[in-house]
Amino acid sequence: MLAPLEEPSREVLGDLPRGQVARAKLPTKNRVILVANDTPDSLSAIAASLTDEGYTPLTACDGQEVLRELQRQAVDLVALDVSMPTMDGVVTCREMRSHPDFSRLPVIIYGDLEDANRREEAFRAGCNVYVSLTDPDGLLGPIEDLLGEAAEPVFLDELAKPTVLVIDDDPQILRLLVRFLEMEGLDVVTGTSGEELDQKLTSTLPDVIILDVMLPGEDGLQILQRLKSDPATEPIPVVITSGGSERELVNKALNSGADDYLAKPVDPSRLKARVNACLNTRRLTLLQAAYREKLETANRQLENLVSSQTAQLAEAHLSLVFAMSKLAESRDPETGAHLERLRAYCQLLCKALLAQGSYRSELTPAFVETIYQASPLHDIGKVGVPDSVLLKPGKLTPEELEVMKTHTTIGAQTLLDVQKRCPSNRLIEMAVDITWAHHERWDGQGYPRGLAELEVPLSARILALGDVYDALTSKRPYKEALAHDQSVAIVSQGRGTQFDPLIVQAFEAVSQEFVRVRETYSE
């Protein structure tokens, strides 16, 4: 007999298949879904959605009624509103998990789940999935995922007794192979040509194929190539058989994906060893596929969790970025609402550049959003500039000016250290560019690196213009604010020297909107 294949334990497998296992495709009409919601209209809408999909809905108005229904009738899944009176979804789920009869039932908690603490409570209570429900159909996807995962595997009769498909046009060899294989407790299906192989495959997929390399019409190599190019048959192990004169064909077959080779006349012990090895390979392939399916389901559930938390994390992250920027600004209190105005100017310039057809490949929606979030960090390096320089009311000396210029490199180095920890963070990457290069000039006469033209990152070129306009139109202890028209004229004079000509063109097209921004975020 073939050595029995070692079965993974039930604890390891969970609901995964053994051997060639087909997941139970249970008809949805037989699946009972218990839905709880204290709002009659919502409950009716969800029940109607489930009925349309072929499920059998049961309804309850609170957690206590859920527990009573579970005592009365078997259900396949429970969907609980998070905010029911008397006994809400979280408490109900916790009660279910403490009851031996209901502890393994799939549970979805749905509703307004923007509260991170509430979501965490739901998972601690034992729910499988939470859903922020916006319409009644929103439960269908999670229900399908959970019921697919929970479906008991069906162990087909053919798999308790693996099937081998033998294709050979020699009747005597075919009879010998059948006898040897049946003696090992295997089911054997036979054919004499590629055409017969195709017919057999329409009714069953074998666990191993034994294929003669020399067949009338389509030879074994051509058949093998077809098998390995079809996703349905590609995973099935194929053993090639041949006489000694077809060595070249055998080599081609092995190079084309055949798993093993048997020389004729076939030795029973070698046949046993080859088939046993192929069945083990087949078992591992099927287990891998089943684990992959389970992993994909888990990934979908994780994506649901991550997507809902990402918005909160992003909001917290961006709030922290702005707080850091305000920290730098607080050392230079004269700037007032400078950060709010500057980020608005950057967005206006991006939109104007797109409208005139400039830098379209770079000005993606992600770029426009990122410059809005990163621009407040442009002067973060000022935290490293001494107060005697930063807060000096009059004109800086040449030495003091050189100290002031270091804020670009201080800020960039600080953010580069952050970038090492977050190498793929788009916001930090752009913030480095802006902080380091927003005092560079189009003609290469800026600082700290003397970059010129397109060497200066686009984000820094955009911010540089907005920063200068805001400085011109703002009052300082050492100067009065200039009028808008006068400031526009000065910016325009910097076309091709201080500023990118295309960005100046965009600025001139939307300069009146800059006035509205200043009015909105006045000093």
Image: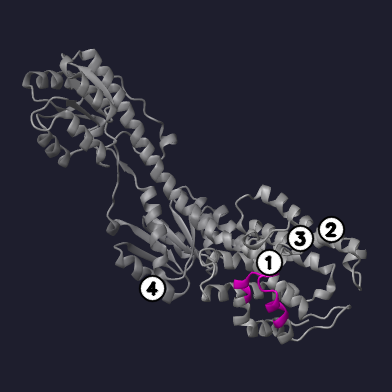
Pointers 1 and 3 in contact (CB under 8 A)?
no
Disc 1 residue type (three-letter) = Ser
| Disc 4/disc 3 C-alpha distance (Å) | 67 Å
Q: Give the class, few, some or many, for how many residues have Cα within 10 Å of label 4's Cα (few <14, many ≥20).
A: some
Residue interval drawn in magenta: 489-504
Element assignment for label 2: helix
| Badge 4 element | helix
Q: Judge by depth and name the residue closer to the eye, 265 or 277.
A: 265
Label 3 secondary element: loop
Residue 234 percent across, percent down from the top left: 27, 37
> What residue do we see at 84% from left, 73% from top?
333
Give the CA distance from mark 1 to mark 3: 18 Å
Pointers 1 and 4 in contact (CB under 8 A)? Answer: no
Image depth: mark 2 or mark 3 in front = 3
Vertical position of residue 198 compared to residue 386: above or below: above
Identity of the residue drawn at 19% across and 21% down = 241
The residue pinned by badge 1 equals 375
Q: Is mark 1 on a helix, strand or loop?
A: helix
Q: In the picture shown, does residue 478 fall above or below 228?
A: below
The location of residue 293, given as percent across then percent down, is 39, 45
Q: Crowding at label 1, few (<14), some or many (≥20) Cα neighbours within 10 Å? A: many
Disc 1 versus disc 2: distance between alpha carbons?
A: 19 Å
Cα distance in 3D space between marks 2 and 4: 63 Å
Tag 4 near tag 3, CB within 8 Å: no
Relative to 1, is 325 above or below? Answer: below
Query: Is tag 2's residue or tag 3's residue first in the polypeptide sequence?
Result: 2
Residue for badge 4: 44
- Mark closest to the chain's N terminus, 4 or 3: 4
